[in-house]
Amino acid sequence: MSLVQSVDNVALLPGYLAAGTAVLVLLVDLLVARQAVTVAVAALGAAGTALGAALVGAAGTRRTFCVGVADMRGNSAPGADCSWVWNGRAALVAAVIALLTLGVLAISGPLLRSGRTPAGEYCFLLACAMTGGVVLGAAGDLITLLVAVETLTLPLYVLVGLRRASLAGAEAAVTFFVVSVVATTVTLLGAALLYAVTGSLHLDRLGATLAARDDLRDLPLTTVAVALVVAGLAFKVAAVPFHAWAPTTYDGAPLPVAAYLSTASKLGGVVALLAVVQRALPAGVTGPVLAALAALTMTVGNLVALRQRRTVRLLAWSSVAQAGYILAPLGALALAAGRTADARDGAYAAAVAYAVFFVLLELAAFAAVVALRPADGDGGTLADLRGAARRHPWVGGAFALALIGLAGLPPGLAGLFAKVTVVRSLLAGHAGWLALVVALNAVLGLAYYLRVAATLYAVPSGVAATRPARTVAVALVVATVAAVVIGFAPQFVLDVAAR
């Protein structure tokens, strides 16, 4: 038997496009040294990556870097253990990550034009983070998964502290770095213990082994390994009690970087956690843990958000609460009724769909904050937003629509559908108590979302109006329109997530 693996370069094309974008940005910045050209190359690379991911995903499931079962030509068969599996969900994740990168580049115009942030390094690091997100969706083993998560996260350490004269930025970068290193160490330790128990790192093989061997599932070492992996990835999602880094990091980072952390980075953490829960770890162990994490995360996030007076901190705590809603469908795995094939598929699809809806609305909210704040400034306080919708009706209206969508109210149909999907998946898994917690927290979230929306339309405080940058306005319009369109046709995202 030949030990030479055949490599499916078509399946790897989205990864090639993302990594090529990072290399090309570095070369263009070195050889041309013009900010506009560098940003344009990064934007075109992100758009090309999204298009490539969608086209490869539309062609069906493709696998490469496989061991085990193979056909007569040496090509991997569906039963093989593969480190790269490109399917509809991987394509959806990669396309969303690439489009989020494109959106963040668009709202970064004022920051880059201020001259305090080097455009070459900024675009290169964003492209590197995008590469990690693209690889993450296709990861078929724990090593590829963890390397992809770190490739997504490592550039953000630098981006958070890229404002060299900002003490808050330095504090945020150090906080983020220390917490992420600890989280990565915990996850790696859990992965090592899983390998010691099962002798495998491929996600599907891990799941099959643990499902077939009751003696392995009952080992204390297995329980510790599962707990460490879930806890380490919960840091990436900013789930309570692993959330303390998020408000400080978001508030100290440049606004576009905070937007990327709250959208692309959080989506990456959700995808990583979903991959191990769905394919590798026993549902009987992870279900109760995820149910408790979801209930605690959404409740703490909403309660603390009520007391916030700084805009970005409020959005950060709101993002923590939204992580609880994303994790909630997985809590249905705590009950036997939630582990049937239909209930599991519905829970996984609901988690992915909610994450996609959330990141679109969150990007629109951050784009509006960037449009209303000075270039290279922080998010300011809620008092600074007083009357903003009267000075900038279109920007204020888009901001209010994003907030209403995050609250789950019409006309923010994307957010409304997302919450209905989560509740429906919980009821299908007979987790009615968790559905009630979601409903109560949704009502609790109305208090601060509507308070911010009302502040936008209050009597102006006399602050001079500033004209939003053109690229920021375009990003805000596109994100808002995308959220509205998906709100009218949400079943497409749910169908892709289910596949």
Image (cartoon, rainbow, N blue to C red):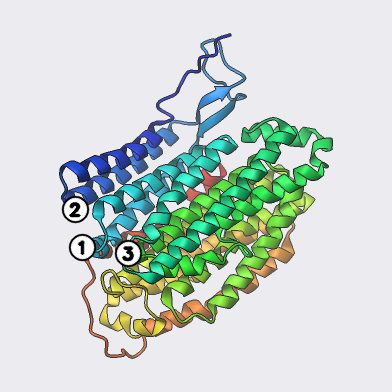
Instruction: From the image, tell me which residue sits under label 3.
Output: 163
The disc, 1 or 2, on the residue closer to the chain's N-terminal end is 2
Q: Is residue 283 above or below residue 406?
A: above
**Residue 489 visible:** no
The disc, 3 or 2, on the residue closer to the chain's N-terminal end is 2
Residue 195 placement (x, y as % from top left): 68, 35
Mark 3 falls on what kind of element? loop
Instruction: From the image, tell me which residue sits under label 2.
Output: 35
Q: Quadrant of the C terminus?
A: top right
Toward the viewer: 225 or 268? 225
Q: Is residue 449 left or right of residue 333?
A: left
Q: Is residue 21 left or right of residue 493?
A: left
Instruction: From the image, tell me which residue sits under label 1.
Output: 113
Q: Is residue 305 above or below residue 296?
A: below
Q: Residue placed at 78% from the left, 33% from the top?
A: 212
| Quadrant of the rendered image containing residue 197 | top right
